[in-house]
Image: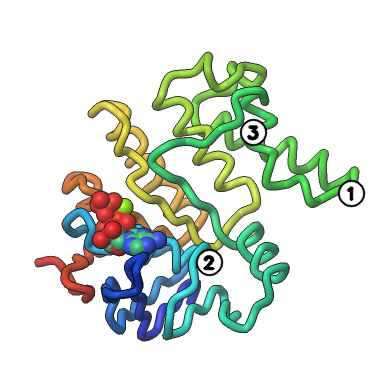
Amino acid sequence: MVCELQNITKTYTSPSGSAHLTILNEISLNLNKGESAAIVGPSGSGKTTLLHIAAGLLQPDSGTVVIDGASVSGMDDRELAVMRNRKIGVVFQHHYLLPQCTLLENVLIPTLPYQDKQDRKKLAERAISIIKRMGLSDRLDHFPPQLSGGECQRVALARALINKPSLLCADEPTGSLDKTNAMEMGELLREINKEERTALLLVTHSEALASQMDRVLELHSGTLSVKS
Ligand SMILES: Nc1ncnc2c1ncn2[C@@H]1O[C@H](COP(=O)(O)OP(=O)(O)OP(=O)(O)O)[C@@H](O)[C@H]1O
Ligand SMILES: [Mg+2]
């Protein structure tokens, strides 16, 4: 199993401390290699919160997160950072590319901890091959401001994939794209999920994108159910 979420509960407290909002209530979810699941639900229902917990970006109040057999709750900050870097790719609604770095440099950023010369050569080759897969091989030395929104989002996907993650988490990855680019991005995500067997957990407001996933799960009032 790539991702196992068991009885995840998350409560936010208001700044004054007077109100406790239970956003996620005993949620469980498993994802196998090559599987994909969409999380849908109303705004504010906790989709991003759940995705961030699965990606190791946020700790739950209770429950367990296990990625590739290793429990996240038992990790210190350093172990967690290494695990996230190696095992988890994340794509957000905004691409968060560095404008002063070229497309190739942006894709290589998650590989910076690997200093070995041999590795770096292989990683650069892999970066070029993923960028090619994204249809951007003629733009390697371009900078993000010279690319369209859809192209930047594909670079962000390439960056998320460079370290061959077991789990790809995407939070409204097509949210800021037009219909054509959104469709293209959706297809790419699905193809990568099947080709590289990367488990895919995707939050979306788009029914069309959600329906491309193996499972569609709806988050409502703190609980997760299969959407009929
Ligand atoms: N750090 C925080 N402190 C307090 N409340 C928070 C915090 N982060 C999120 N919330 C609240 O938790 C709820 C769930 O937020 P979340 O961002 O997970 O929703 P969402 O389903 O992703 O919404 P959207 O579809 O609008 O992106 C919201 O009511 C939000 O206001
Ligand atoms: Mg959200």
User: Can residue 38 be seen in this snapshot?
Assistant: no
> Between tags 2 and 1, which lies in front?
2
Question: Real-space Cα distance between discs 2 and 1?
Answer: 27 Å
- Label 3, secondary structure: give it: helix
The image quadrant that residue 137 belongs to is top right
Q: Residue furthest top?
A: 146
The residue that disc 2 covers is 56
Q: Amino acid at mark 3?
A: Asn
Q: Residue furthest front?
A: 16
**Residue 16 appears at what percent x and percent y?**
34, 68
Where ligand 1 lies, by quadrant?
bottom left
> Between tags 1 and 3, which lies in front?
3
Q: Residue at x 69, y 38 (%)?
A: 108
Q: Residue at x 73, y 47 (%)?
A: 111
Residue 61, placed above or below residue 149? below
How busy is the neighbourhood of tag 1: few (under 14 within 10 Å), some, or many (20 plus)?
few
Q: In the rendered structure, which disc, 3 or 2, sits on the residue that comes first in sequence?
A: 2
Q: In the rendered structure, which disc, 2 or 1, sits on the residue that comes first in sequence?
A: 2
- Label 1, secondary structure: give it: loop
Question: Real-space Cα distance between discs 3 and 2?
Answer: 22 Å
Seen from the viewer's position, the closer of residues 157 and 212 is 157
**Residue 90 appears at what percent x and percent y?**
50, 51
Task: Specify the label residue 106 is tagged with.
Answer: 3
Q: Amino acid at mark 2?
A: Gly
Please say if the residues under marks 3 and 2 sit with CB atoms less than 8 Å apart. no
Q: Quadrant of the C terminus?
A: bottom left
Q: Residue at x 49, y 26 (%)?
A: 135
Q: Is residue 220 left or right of residue 162?
A: left
Task: Specify the label residue 116 is tagged with.
Answer: 1
Residue 176, placed above or below residue 163? above
